[in-house]
Image: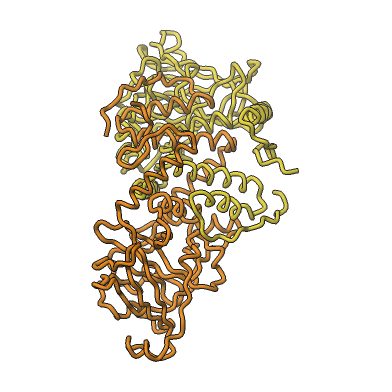
Chain colours: A yellow, B orange
Amino acid sequence: MAAPTKVPIPALLDLTIDNITPNTVKINSQSGDRRMTYLMERLVTHIHDFARETRISTEEWMAALNFLVQCGQISSDVRHEFILLSDVLGLSLLVDSINHPKPPNTTEGSVLGPFHTHDAPTLEHGADMSSDPQGEPLLCICTVKDANGKPVEGAKIDIWETDSSGHYDVQHSDRNEPTERCIMTSDANGDFWFKCILPVSYPIPHDGPVGKLLEKLNRHPWRPAHLHFMFEKKGWDHLITALYMRGDPYETSDAVFGVKKSLIVEPQKIDGATAKEYGVPEGSWVLKHDFVLTTEKETADLRDRLAHEALEKQGLDLKLVDHLPVPDLD
Amino acid sequence: MAAPTKVPIPALLDLTIDNITPNTVKINSQSGDRRMTYLMERLVTHIHDFARETRISTEEWMAALNFLVQCGQISSDVRHEFILLSDVLGLSLLVDSINHPKPPNTTEGSVLGPFHTHDAPTLEHGADMSSDPQGEPLLCICTVKDANGKPVEGAKIDIWETDSSGHYDVQHSDRNEPTERCIMTSDANGDFWFKCILPVSYPIPHDGPVGKLLEKLNRHPWRPAHLHFMFEKKGWDHLITALYMRGDPYETSDAVFGVKKSLIVEPQKIDGATAKEYGVPEGSWVLKHDFVLTTEKETADLRDRLAHEALEKQGLDLKLVDHLPVPDLD
């Protein structure tokens, strides 16, 4: 954090459509935290420009503020309506793309969504993370490697999906323990494997304000069938991603913009030998997938390089401090 | 509302920093409601540009979403944290300025704030709307006229202020009836008069997320002493305003940007004749003020004219439908 700078604060009197923005920016620039100052400057400028370009009516403004209250009030320990809002506005995809750029031939990221929890049980390889007898059994055989094909041992892998009705455990009001989710650790070969159920397409929660917004926009709330994965290991870039099932009716119209071609997979009917090796019934579905991680350093370097390029292209005179842009005042 | 337009929806696959915005805009453009389409186009563009210009980090994004949840969760029937947020960001002032432009020599508007209620008692002229014995008694003698000096009879006037501790009634958890607020009606001469207490400066509620934000920004939460007024009469532009007491220490640094020079007033010690006429003790404070309303039509015409001028200046090719800008596609 830079030393506090003296900001000449204007006399805040007779503010108008034309002078409110620079005055608000100035009064917000007294913290001495250059990043905070820059974020607020951009935020206020965009919000005010939005109001000026749309000549927003008092009724629209009030409706928007009430919408935001509703989003907060429907949120809970197990529901985050603002993540959902960020998802359907394409912001979550954008934030992930900015923060976790991927070098070629490494696994791309996808949206986190609002349903990751911190209470998933740690399971052994081969365990079944689903407790839903209605689902179609799926065996996943996966590896975690680096870009050179070297196994990544000891990566913590969070995996979660819905039950066969298209609901995450937290969406059931009578949930008393986590289901359809687990944590695994990759072994010395970078391998991990687990049983689950074939994912199904499902609507994002649309009984709240975000659902009403989608309805107004004539947008459907569906996500194509997918399995969520999150990879964590010290020194490696945190990877939040998902695998999408080929042929899903919502493959090209995901309500939250998460699908990438490289993340579309196609489960197969298992062959006899594999079924025997993994102790699953013949006729089960099997999915084999290799995840490729990048190091934290590679990602940070790539992110910085892309930030410099993007800011230059936008004509912004900024420098990176702690990898984040601030105005270059020095 | 225009007839639904066919919007060619793109295949939403492989979305990136560069293509997420046009794709989100397209998927949001299917409602056939041109105003909604325009609002969403501007909203998404600004939110995405904000993310791109700041290269917002995942941690900052999550902190912002959690801040919004907190704003929603502290809100209640008697507290609207998002209005407060809009106020401290200068948006409320801007929205009022856009929607209620004032011709010269008419009463300017000011911010509504989050403390207007709908349960104020209707009082007769001369009544005391305060029940706070600690406050310094103030007699207000006011008129409501049009720009030509003609009285406006039968205007409904909402008036509200804090008690002498700087709190509105709704900020007291044991509130069981409205105090320091009332509704009056102007008489045939456009007059109304009432007793209240000399307003005091007070901090906006700063025990919630908006207060924490102000603290981070090294901003104080104070508002200069003022009395709120709201005027309503069919055919007349809805006037939300306030009168600010001259010499207040926060006169030029109002946390919500509401002060205008034309709204600064100076209560006087009452003279003997007036004290006698209105039945108040000698030595009381008195404030005389003439409010000047504009007609709904004058305001609508002025708003449309200013909207056209502003949009042209911004280089936006828009037309007004129901007084609100939409893209000119015809």
Q: Is residue B216 left or right of residue A203?
A: right
Q: Looking at this view, is B243 or A78 the one in front? A: B243
Q: Looking at this view, is A24 or B57 the one in front? A: A24
Q: Looking at this view, is A277 or A38 the one in front? A: A38
Q: Is residue A74 visible?
A: no
Rendered view: A184 above or below B93: above
- Residue farthest front in this picture: B148
Q: Is residue A56 left or right of residue B120?
A: right
The quadrant where residue B235 appears: bottom left
- From the top left corner, tell me how far across and down residue B276 is, in percent: 34, 90
Q: Quadrant of the C terminus of chain A?
A: top right
The quadrant where residue B75 appears: bottom left
Residue shown at 58% from the left, 44% from the top: A39
The quadrant where residue B305 appears: top left
- Residue farthest right in this picture: A330
Count how many numbered circles sit on residues in the image: 0
Residue shown at 26% from the left, 70% from the top: B185
- Residue farthest top in this picture: A272
- From the top left corner, tell me how far across and down residue A60 is, in percent: 35, 46
Rendered view: A122 above or below A52: above
Rendered view: A241 above or below B78: above
- From the top left corner, tell me how far across and down residue B180 is, in percent: 35, 74
Residue shown at 64% from the left, 54% from the top: A31
Residue shown at 48% from the left, 76% from the top: B266
- From the top left corner, tell me how far across and down residue A62 is, in percent: 36, 50
Q: Is residue B275 visible?
A: yes
